[in-house]
Image: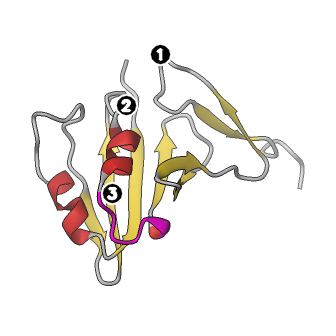
Amino acid sequence: MSRNAEVVVIALDAAEVMEPLTQPDDDREWHQCFRPIGTGILDAWAVEFWRCNWHGLLAYLESLPWPNPHSVQVLIHDEEDDCFVLWMMYDGRLVEVSLPRTRRESFPHASVTGVLTRTDRWEAS
């Protein structure tokens, strides 16, 4: 099954940590490479996954030696998501941050993280 997902990683002073993810590596589960989209004190990288082949990404990111783990934020937009999902580092783990007016549905065979829908998207304004 083809599923697209966009992932953005934001972290302070993390260029050295993210450098290996900007290069191809046959040992990783995924083959796409992150590209820098911001430089300076606050660094950012983005990648588009075009297959549902990035199951190990969150655990991999958790294991990196972040210079400022409290600054790590990962934004994920899976193909069917209504909005980006925010993940932040808490106690060494990337944890999904609950967003108001959203609901997570698990689709283990079609999505790495499930699908996030807005519960207010059909309300009349």
Relative vertical location of residue 18 with respect to residue 25 in this rendering, above or below: below
Relative vertical location of residue 37 with respect to residue 8 in this rendering, above or below: below
Q: Is residue 51 left or right of residue 78?
A: left
* For marks 2 and 1 on the same chain, the one whose residue lies earlier in the sequence: 2
Numbered disc 1: secondary structure: loop
Query: Residue furthest toward the right?
Result: 124
> Which residue corresponds to mark 2?
55
Amino acid at circle 2? His
> Which residue corresponds to mark 3?
46
Q: Nearer the viewer, mark 2 or mark 3?
A: 2
Amino acid at circle 1? His
Q: Quadrant of residue 10?
A: bottom left
Q: Residues within 10 Å of mark 1 (few under 14, many from 20)?
A: few
Q: Is residue 106 left or right of residue 111?
A: right
Mark-to-mark CA distance, 2 and 1 = 11 Å
**Rendered location of residue 33, percent (x, y):** 20, 49
> Looking at the image, which is closer to me, 7 or 29?
29
> Which residue corresponds to mark 1?
109
> Looking at the image, which is closer to me, 51 or 17?
17
Mark-to-mark CA distance, 1 and 3 = 24 Å
Query: Residue furthest toward the front?
Result: 91
Contact (Cβ within 8 Å) of mark 2 with mark 1:
no
**Rendered location of residue 48, percent (x, y):** 33, 46
Question: Does 76 lie within the magenta span?
Answer: no
Query: Residue furthest toward the bottom?
Result: 40
Magenta residue span: 65-70
Amino acid at circle 3? Ala
**Rendered location of residue 21, percent (x, y):** 20, 52
